[in-house]
Each structure stands twice: as C-alpha cells, then as structure tokens.
Image (cartoon, helix red, strand yellow):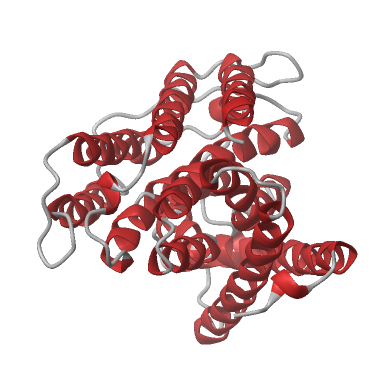
Amino acid sequence: MPQTDILSVPALIVVFLCAAAVITLAGVRLTALADRLADQTRMGEAVFGAVLLGGVTSLPGIVASVTAALEGHAQLAVSNAIGGIAAQTVFLVVADITYREANLEHAAPSVKNLIYGILLCALLALVLTAAHGPDFNVFGVNPMSVVIILAYGFGVRLASRTQDFPGWRPDSTLETHEDKPAPENSGIQHPGRVWLAFTALALTVAAAGFVVAQTGIALVGKTGLSETLVGGFFTAVATSLPELVTSIAAVRQGALTLAVGGIIGGNTFDVLFVAFSDIAYTEGSIYHAVGSEPLFIIALTLLMTAVLLLGLVRREKSGVGNVGFEGGLVLGIYLAGFVVLSLGGR
C-alpha cells in the first residue's frame, strides 16, 4: 500500500493528477475494446457495459471500501461504496451534456438498463433494511450480505435473458440510437488479443484508481472532515473516475447504450461493496456499525436513481442544452446532499 500520508500536499496533488491522467488514457481505450467485445460476444452494449465494463471500472472502489472495513472504518467503507453510486449517477449527467444531438436517456433506450435501475433500488432498500433490522450475524457476517449478492445475481440473469426476448420495446424516433453491432466489430478477429488488452487495461485502471483513492484520502484526512463526508464524496469521486472517463468516451464513440449501461450497471455492482465490506469487517455487522450519515447518503442515492428511472421511462427528447429534466434534478439533489453533509460533517 502506498504511504501517501507521508507526502507533502504538492506531491500528493502531482500523484493524484498523474494517476487521473492514466485513468483518462486507459479508460478511453478500455471503452473502445468493450464496445468491440459487446458485439463479438453478442452480449449487447447494455449487458456488457453493466456486467463487465461496470465491474472493471468499479475495482478501485472495491479496494477502497474493503481496505477501510478491514481497518475498522465502517462509515468510510459504506460511504465510499454508496457515495460512488451517487457520483457515478452525476457522471451520467456529465456524459449527457457532452452528447449534443438529444437527451441521452431518450437516445439510448434499453429494457435491460431499466431492469438494472430497478435492481439498484431494490439492493439499496436491502441495505437500509439490514441497517434497521436486528443486529444479527453469523461468523461476523450479516445474512443480508448473502441476500444482496444472490439478489444481484438474479437481477443480472433476468437482464441477460431480455437480450433476445424483451417483454416490450421502446418506440424508435429520429434521435434513437439503436444498439447494433458495428460492421468492423461483426467478425471475430483475434478475440484473444482483444480480451488480453481489455484485461491489461482493466488492471491499469484499477491500479491508477487505487492510487487516486489513497491520495484523496491523504489530502482530505488532514482537514478534520467526518468519515462519511470523506468517503461519500471525496474518495467516492476519486475511485469513480474510471466511470466518468469511460462514459464520456462511450458517448463520443457512439456507444450510447454502453455509456448508460456502464453507469447503471456499475452502480448496481457497487452495492456489492457493502456486502464485501461486511465480510471484511471483523467487529460484527457493518450495517449496524454506521451512523445516520451513511444512511442519509443511501436515501439520497435512492432518490437520484428514482429520478433517473423516471427519465429513462419518460424519454424526454431535449431540455436545457439537450439535457432532460432528470439531469437537472439529479445534479441538484447531489449538490444539496453535499451541502447538507458539509454543514454537519466536521
């Protein structure tokens, strides 16, 4: 583990920026390979983005949350996990701003992304249920952690089965961008090399994201801010940088469904951080070791996800700068939550 806490503030900033640059460069290439593999494997952009791309870009967050839990920082672990979901939802708004042709939620309709959004709400509800339920654990692990993992697996299987047999389809418009394999990706040309490059870039993004997280913790740890504020906003944003880079890169490459699926699917996967952290936390159930502030972030994230789902169903063609109502609301909710925690997080 890098000893970032012994570095000076200027040195920390340099390390942070260098790691962020690595994430930017690797993330752009990672998205291009993900788009190609989505076509070659016939998984589709939504499923591939949600499961593989979303999971890969979540690696820095897993490391940060599990490490915090192992060291006994329950609030930091949970806040980092859930705060990352909130930050990544805002990143989708940023990606929406970069797409000038129409509202991104209108242009990239997907039944699978709706399923992942609903699954995310259900998983967050399970976390809240565990936190307010009996303080019970088996070998230090709350049974709800197992339920969360199983529920995630069921939801992924349900979304995957809609690839060829969806129950319904959204109406197509002139602004709709359908998920169709690109001609240059239709042939399986050296799939092993593509997977090898994808894996190498995934490890690079994970390592760079981990360095960003560590430098972020060192920078804000000296200010006296609460673990919830540090984890929910600072380290969460730092470890979520891969999602920002890959979502913008996906939009610029025309892989709109991949961009939305990568964020929503990655958010769903990030709830597993809480289950993993509970397993790593040795002092009992992590759900009952956190205070009210992490639960506030969970409720905030539920609200943001609900607004995003409304946008995906409503499919507003354009709004202010081609960003729909959901984008403005998500950004406003996030900023309001940051202000609330900042006022009480010292």
Q: At which x and y percent is residue 53?
A: 50, 60
Using the image as rendered, state which of residue 161 and residue 63 is in the foreground: 63
Residue under the image location 35 percent in, 60 percent down: 277
Quadrant the N terminus occupies: bottom right
Where 139 falls versus 131 (above or below)? Answer: below
Residue under the image location 23 percent in, 54 percent down: 285
Where 132 falls versus 219 (above or below)? Answer: above
Quadrant the C terminus occupies: top right
Residue under the image location 38 percent in, 57 percent down: 273
Using residue 95 as the reference point, say whether residue 193 is left or right of it.
left
Residue most extreme to the right: 10
Residue under the image location 24 percent in, 39 percent down: 131
Q: Quarter-wise, where is residue 94 in the image?
A: top right
Q: At which x and y percent is residue 152?
A: 26, 51
Using the image as rendered, state which of residue 260 and residue 217 is in the foreground: 217
Using residue 184 as the reference point, say whether residue 98 is left or right of it.
right
Using the image as rendered, state which of residue 36 and residue 53 is in the foreground: 53
Can I make out residue 46 in this image? no
Total number of numbered labels?
0
Where 113 falls versus 103 (above or below)? Answer: below
Q: At which x and y percent is residue 193?
A: 57, 86
Q: At which x and y percent is residue 177?
A: 58, 36
Can I make out residue 302 in this image? yes
